[in-house]
Amino acid sequence: MKIRKIDNLRFGLAVLVLIVVFAFVLPVFYRVSPYEQDLSNPLSAPSIDHPMGTDMYGRDLMARIMKGTANTLMVSFLASLVSLIIGIIAGVISGFSRGIISELVMRLADVLLGFPKLVMILLISGILSRDIFVSFFLLACLSWMETARIIRGEIKVIKESLLYKSLVAAGLSFPKVLLGYIFPLLRGKFLVSFTLSFASFILIEISLSFLGLGYASPEPSLGTLLRQARYDPAGSYWIVIFTGLIIIILVSAVNFIADGIKDSLEENVSR
Amino acid sequence: MSRDNIILEVKHLTVGYSQKKPVVKDVSFLLKKGECLAIFGKLGSGKTTIAMAILGFIAPIYGMVLLNSINILKIRGRKRREVRRRIQPIFQDPFLSLHPMKRIKTVLEDSIGRESGKSVKRYLNMVGLDASYMDRLPSQLSGGELQRVCIAKALCTNPEVLILDEPFTAQDHVTKVKLAVLLRDLKNKYNLSYLLITHDIFTVSFLSDRVLLLDQGKITETMTAGEFREKYIAEL
C-alpha cells in the first residue's frame, strides 16, 4: 500500500521533470524557431526534418509545442505561486488574529468563493486585461481562498497545541515561531495547495487560449495550439494528437503529484 | 512572611469563558523563592486553567499575577516576551511539546536565544543527558528522555518559576521517580520555585513543600506537605 502511494508521487514527479526538460532544456539542442514560417511546407506530416510535422504556416510543430508548453508552465507556475503566497498571508492573518480581522478575511473569502469562477475568468481575461500575465495575476489574486481556509484551520489547531505554548513561553519572536516552527509543519499543505492550483491554472490557461483570450498570436501555448488545430483542414491529425497528448500527460502528472503528497501526508498522520 | 521572599503572587484570580460561570473562582496564593507549591485537585477542578492564566494563555476575567511584585498580565510587547521567559511550563506530554522535525540542539539553542553548542551541552548535562543527544530528533528519544529535554529547554531561559503541569502523568513508575528526583535536585541546587499542578498523590508528597486543595475552581484547604501526607497517604 505504502509503495503504491509513494509511486504516485514519484511517477508524477518523473513525468513532470521530463516535460520540464522537454519544454526548457530540449530547445537548447533543437535549434528550430517556433515562429519561423515556411509557406512552401505547410501542414506536412511528421518526418525526420519535422518530427511532429508542421502547422498551416509551415512552422515546426515540435518547436511550437516546446515553446507552448514552456509558456503554459511558466504562467501557471507564477499564478499558483502568487495564489499560494496570498493564501498563506490571508490564512496566517486570519489564524492568528481574533475577532473582526479574522472574520473579515474569512467573509471576504466566502464572498469570493460565491462568485462563479468561469464568469470571473472570462471577465478578467476578456474585458479587464488582454495581457496574459496581468490576467493570471488577477486570477491568482482571486484564487487564494481554499489555501487560506486550510492554513487558517491548521494555525487555529497549532495555536492550541503544547508545542506552540512552550515556544511562546520560551519568548521566541513571532517570525521565529512562524517561519521556524509552524511553516515546516505546514509545508505538506503548501505543496498540496500549490500543486492542485498549478493543475487548475494549467487547465485555465489552456481553456482561455483555446477561446482566444490567452496568449496572443504568434506566441504559442498549449491552448492556442489546440485552437489552431480546429481551423486546420481535416487530415492534419498530428497537431491535435501531439498537443492533446502533452496536455493529458502534463495535467495527469501534476494531479499524480498532488495525490502522492496527500497520500504520504495521511500516511505520516496515521503513523 | 517576609515579602522579599515572595516570587509569585496570584491575587483573586477568576478565569472562565463566561463571567456567570467561571472555571476558577477568586483564587489567591503566594509562591516563595525555592518553594514547591502544589495545586492538588480532581480532573476538571481548574488546575490547568490557573496555570494557563499565569502563563498568559488565557485572559482572566479578574485578578492579578505578580512576578516579583510586577503584574505580568498588564505587560505588553517585547517586555512581555522577556517576562514570559522567567516563568516556564513543563507539560504533561513531552512529545507534543517538542517540534518533531527539530533536533534537540536547535530546540535548546532557540530557547537560549543564541547558537552555542557549549551551553546546550551544559543544559543537557544539568538534566542528566550527554552531548550525544544534541543531534537527535524527538522521535529517537524515550518518554523520560523527552521530558528531561523539556526540563532542559525550560532551564535554558534561566527561569525563576517552573510550572509543572502533570509532569509525570505520561511516564512509567521508574521514570516518574527518576524525574521527580531530578526536579527536586534542580530545585535545591538552583533555588528554583515550582508551581506543581497535579492530581497524583505521590508527586505531591515527594516534591511539594505546601499544598493547595482545589475543588470546582476554589481553594478549599491549604496545608503543609507533612499534613498532606498524613491526611492522604495514611488514608491509602
Image (tube, helix red, strand yellow):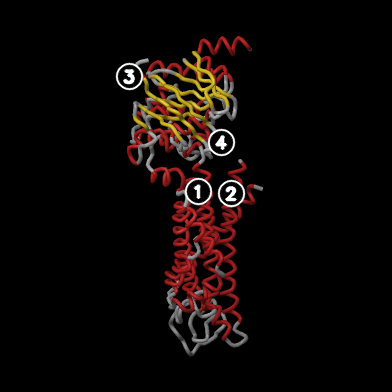
Can residue A215 be seen here? The reply is yes
Front position among marks 1 and 3: 3
Where does the image place residue B126, in percent across and percent down from the top left? 40, 22
User: What residue is pinned by disc 2?
Assistant: A264
- The disc placed on residue A186 is 1
Q: Nearer the viewer, residue A159 or B42?
A: B42
Cα separation, mark 1 vs mark 3, equals 47 Å
**Quadrant in the picture for the N terminus of chain B:** top left
Seen in the image, is B156 located left or right of residue A223?
A: left
Instruction: Tell me the kind of residue under disc 1.
Output: Leu
Circle 4 SS class: loop
The residue type indicated by label 4 comes to Lys
Q: Quadrant of the C terminus of chain B?
A: top right
Secondary structure, mark 2, is helix
- Is the residue at mark 1 from the same chain as the one at mark 3? no
The residue where tag 4 is placed is B21
Where A191 sits versus B196, above or below? below
Q: Extreme right residue here?
A: A1
The tag earlier along the polypeptide, 2 or 1, is 1
Looking at the rendered structure, whether the residues under marks 4 and 3 are on a common chain is answered as yes
Residue lying at the far bottom in this picture: please name it: A40
Of badges 4 and 1, the one in the foreground is 4
Residue type indicated by callout 3: Asp
Q: Is residue A49 visible?
A: no
Have a look at marks 2 and 1 and say if they share a chain.
Answer: yes
Q: CA distance from mark 2 to mark 1?
A: 14 Å
Q: Image height check: is A251 above or below A262? A: below
User: Which residue is identified by label 3?
Assistant: B4
Same chain letter for marks 4 and 2: no
Left/right of residue A206 with respect to residue A2 in the rendered view: left
* Outermost residue, front side: B20
Q: Is residue B172 left or right of residue B62?
A: right
